[in-house]
Amino acid sequence: MTSSSAARNQHLDELRALMASHSPPIHALLIPSEDAHQSEYVSERDKRRQFISGFTGSAGLALITTKEALLWTDGRYFLQATNQLSDRWRLMRMGEDPPVEVWIADNLSDEAVIGIDSWCISVDSAQRYEQAFLKKNQTLFQLSSDLVDEVWKDRPPNDATPVIVHPVEFAGRSVAQKMKELREKLQHEKASGIIITALDEVAWLYNVRGNDVHYSPVVHSYAIVTLHGAFFYVDKRKVTTEVKNYMSESGIDIREYDMVQLDVSLLASGQLKGSAVNGSLHMEKDINAAEHSKIWIDSNSCCLALYSKLRPDQALMLQSPIALPKAVKNPMELTGLRKAHIRDGAAVVQYLAWLDNQMQENYGASGYFSEANGSQKKEHLEIKLTEVSVSDKLEAFRAEKEHFKGLSFPTISSVGPNAAIIHYSPEANTCAELDADKIYLCDSGAQYLDGTTDITRTVHFGKPSEHQKLCYTAVLKGHIALDAAVFPNGTTGHALDILARTPLWKSGLDYRHGTGHGIGSYLNVHEGPHLISFRPSARNVPLQASMTVTDEPGYYEDGNFGIRLENVLIVKEADTKFNFGEKGYLSFEHITWAPYQTKLINTALLTPAEIEWVNLYHSECQKILESYLNVQEKEWLRKATEPITASS
């Protein structure tokens, strides 16, 4: 047993002791992955589920009972969780095993008390759990403090990194414009105010960014907006003079982060005081009359702790009115995203050309273009290439580009069997060395002031098998099918998901993750409310022109290899010959630029239209990127984008 495993076992025992001594005794403790804002990616100090379980994936839910420890996660992480969980834990596979609330209702005793940190669970989840618990009169109990924090003695501190004003030249719209539209929506719904809890929504609305969470340029904060006032809840140590003046000019009151719960209570009773836009004090009671008595929350992102301060009949539970305006990019955001993806594509090409050269020089690989047999690693490598060292090189290429601010998620740099772990995260002391005879998958992205990027390419520097070529080509065919889709307004990502899977299904292949997610404008790399997926939630929001979405089918063989190809697309209006139903039709524009490895393609499996698609994409790729490359890199790209034919 490793020292870290022993420590986690000790923490598990300490947690159970706290549960037993609690009043009332806690029979089971829920430990979500999320923070108080229901974020996907959280700060180091909010990784409670990771701390207690050892599982490092971004999605999962731990349940500690008096005798068992269980962890639920989705198909992206089945392999990773299997590898990381100790024998004291049981893996529960979402979509295959019963959901956590069903398991609790079926396996725990009547009147069992299930503890939860009410800041770290959404209203939706809490209400779903409570409904399931009725079966045995079980109770979801809101803890006054998080029990995990009590056993986490070396929990990382709360750093005070400054809030940053995001210029309108990148945001595209002013705070005043956004607030005007938001207040119009409040009036339309007869709501007196809204509580905004999602970090990217606060950042988008107020045109601010921060460094509180790795990879996501957000600041830990809340917002309350009423018909006449606006409030920003943040650790005031993070507020510079510039931000203070900016907020004042925008008619926004700055409050301490931990005042939000008190102010929600005041809002609920019509007693919230603040500075109006003209600088005079007002009380929300003036506008909290019967016709404007509702307070808007998004029950998917608002935590139970804040919801509990409202009367149940007072909460207007609808999708956040910020979600769609944030997802539907304005012209300036679209321009920025296109530019960011061009610079990013240049960095990826520089990286692939560098890596190709390194693999040939140090490992005797046949290289990116050749399928010659055999590879001979140098006996005395000065610097061996590992999954982490090469991903660091990719980051270095990106860091040279204009407006670079950091990565948008931990790079998935994975060789051979590790590439089959869908969200594999290599660590310097345990990661694999590159291997010329195995597939290499790299899923990476960056944050630039003018846009967020996300790209995946899969390559082989040796001789790929015919089976690997078949699988790669099936993934590519699905990738092209989605990219080339034309569909009527009102179509959801649930309806489109099948396009990317059909070529794989024809060979009896599939993948366990969604096909596409929205992407932010210098914000979160995963952005809703739309998505392209087999999951029922993908039926909720139709795709609209100017939304962004990824196109990323894949295929994974456990213990062997993984393949994924990913571009970012912009939804655009389609120019169709007819317009049945007067709906208007949509299509996609790809804005990601990096070649596909043609030696992995079995061209006999491609249709003439698919071959034409690849050749056109590669031709554009070369034209768009060459001005960013040196002579050697240009030559590499020219070779990588040579036309393919059915007989090649």
Image (tube, rainbow, N blue to C red):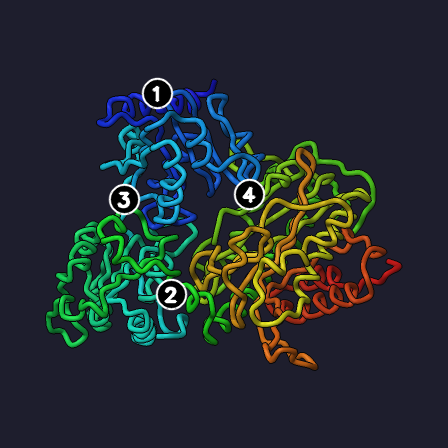
Tell me residue 389's x, y (percent): 55, 42
Does residue 166 sit above or below 59 in this rendering?
below
Which corner quadrant of the image does residue 583 belong to?
Answer: bottom right
Tell me residue 453's x, y (percent): 52, 59
Q: Amino acid at mark 2?
A: Ile
Residue found 35% across the figure and 20% down from its top: 13
Tell me residue 83's x, y (percent): 55, 29
Instruction: Answer with left or right where residue 435 lies relative to residue 491.
Output: right
Does residue 10 sit above or below 48 in this rendering?
above
Regarding mark 4 in the picture, which secondary structure is present there? loop
Mark earlier in primary sequence (3, 4): 3
Residue assigned mark 1: 13
616 and 24: which is toward the camera: 24
Q: CA distance from mark 1 to mark 4?
A: 30 Å
Q: CA distance from mark 2 to mark 4?
A: 29 Å
Regarding mark 3 in the picture, which secondary structure is present there? loop
Residue found 31% across the figure and 49% down from its top: 303
510 and 450: which is toward the camera: 510
Residue assigned mark 4: 423
Does residue 497 sit above or below 292 in this rendering?
above
Q: CA distance from mark 1 to mark 3?
A: 26 Å
Residue assigned mark 2: 322
Q: In which quadrant will I find the C terminus?
A: bottom right
Mark earlier in primary sequence (1, 3): 1
Residue assigned mark 3: 158
Q: Amino acid at mark 1?
A: Asp
Mark earlier in primary sequence (2, 4): 2
Of tags 1 and 3, the one toward the viewer is: 1
Does residue 425 sit above or below 323 in this rendering?
above
